[in-house]
Amino acid sequence: MMCDVCGKETRVIDSRFIENDKMPYIRRRRQCVDDKCHNRFTTLEVHQEWTTMLSTDKRRQKLQENLQQRIADLNSALDMLQ
């Protein structure tokens, strides 16, 4: 990954896997390798497989698509109740 200040290469100085209730991700602290810059920043990486879930009808869907479908189903159910 490139430094966002000077554009040179960076190196990882710390890497942690974080699993929370929303989505697991990898937090990496990076530092520019340039002797003059030494810029530090954090990146959060979400793996593509982590954003996919298996729906009840055994289809793989992106998590966002699945959530949108669940919201639409709930809205339909609420409309029927009214």
Image: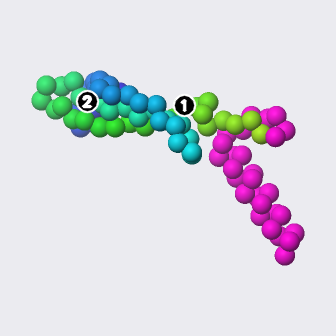
Quarter of image, res 54: top right
Q: Is residue 23 left or right of residue 60?
A: left
The image shows a total of numbered marks equal to 2
Quarter occupied by residue 58: top right
Residue 7 visible, this orientation: no
Near-viewer residue (5 or 10): 10
Q: Amino acid at mark 2?
A: Gln
- Residue at figure coordinates x 75%, y 51% from the top left: 69
Q: Residue furthest bottom?
A: 82
Q: Is residue 33 left or right of residue 74?
A: left
Q: Position of residue 5 (x, y in %)?
A: 24, 37
Identified at 70% across, 52% down, the residue is 68
Which corner quadrant holds the N terminus?
A: top left
Main SS, magenta region, reads: helix
Identified by mark 1, the residue type is His
Please rate how many residues cluster around mark 1, counting C-alpha atoms within 10 Å: few if below 14, some from 14 to 19, many from 20.
few
- Up-down relation of residue 12 to residue 58 (above or below): above
Magenta stretch: give its range: 56-82
The percent coordinates of residue 49 (x first, y second) are: 61, 30
Could you tell me which residue is drawn at 60 percent across and 34 percent down? 50
Question: Residue 35: x, y in percent?
Answer: 13, 25
Residue corresponding to mark 1: 47
Residue 31 badge = 2
Where residue 67 sits in the image (x, y, percent)?
69, 50
Helix, strand or loop status at disc 2: strand
Work out how far the residue at label 1 is from the one at label 2, CA to CA, in angstroms: 22 Å
